[in-house]
Image (cartoon, grey):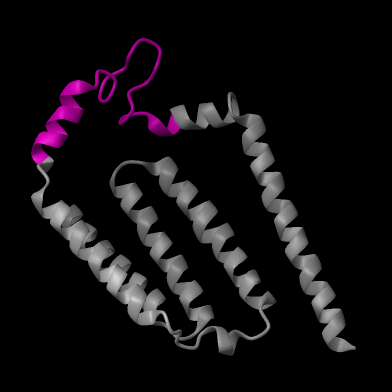
Amino acid sequence: MFIDAIFYLVSILLISNSLLILFSKNVYRSAVFLAFSMLCFAAMYFMLSAEFIGVIQILVYVGAVSVLIALSVMLVKDIEKSTDNNRLLYYSSAIGLIFLVSISFFILNFEWNEFSRNILDGSNCLLSNCGSEPAILIESTNWLGKLITTDFMIAFQLSGLILLASLIGALALLRIRMNDDSK
């Protein structure tokens, strides 16, 4: 019962922050609402016992992507002009409404219980160990941590270097722009 209440609270926060992202006139506030909605997604992952994905959600999306959005907003010169209503608002609203109706139709007409039974009955490694491999739903954090630090170490380090290079490049562009504006 307590978990259900937490789930509904996090869901309401997620939906409200998502709507605030869409309807906020200020770009900075939209970035803050985006960070809060990403935190709500991380809370959902924690409730699904996917702690590793929740931590990655917080580190990568809440931390890095929010900072990247804030830096890119700072690099844009005419923020006031960029938040004006645009002429495609009605078309995009119609497309969004069509998408929402089709997704709702799918969710209401799908056989979720049969789908869940097929997943739980069809996988041998979902809840129990398969030889030396851990179960997917029980020890995913340890297993993913070992994969990142052994098999995918080079890719993990390269992605960190790419993010560092993009941050340095953005700061260099900001410094050049500040020097040009001061002259």
Q: Identify the magenta region.
A: 113-142
Residue 54 placed where, x, y %? Answer: 41, 48
Is 47 placed above or below 72 here?
A: above
In the rendered structure, the answer to whether residue 2 lies left or right of residue 83 reads left
In the rendered structure, the answer to whether residue 44 lies left or right of residue 142 reads left
Residue 17 placed where, x, y %? Answer: 35, 72
Q: Nearer the viewer, residue 90 or 64?
A: 90
Q: Is residue 36 magenta?
A: no
Q: Is residue 5 visible?
A: no
Q: Quadrant of residue 149?
A: top right
Q: Quadrant of the C terminus?
A: bottom right
Q: Is residue 81 visible?
A: yes
Q: Is residue 136 magenta?
A: yes
Residue 113 placed where, x, y %? Answer: 9, 39
Is 104 placed above or below 23 here?
A: above
> Residue at horizontal 31%, vertical 53%?
44
Residue 167 placed where, x, y %? Answer: 71, 59
Residue situated furthest top in the rendering: 131
> Residue at horizontal 52%, vertical 80%?
27
Q: Nearer the viewer, residue 108 or 147?
A: 108
Residue situated furthest right in the rendering: 183
> Residue at horizontal 34%, vertical 76%?
91
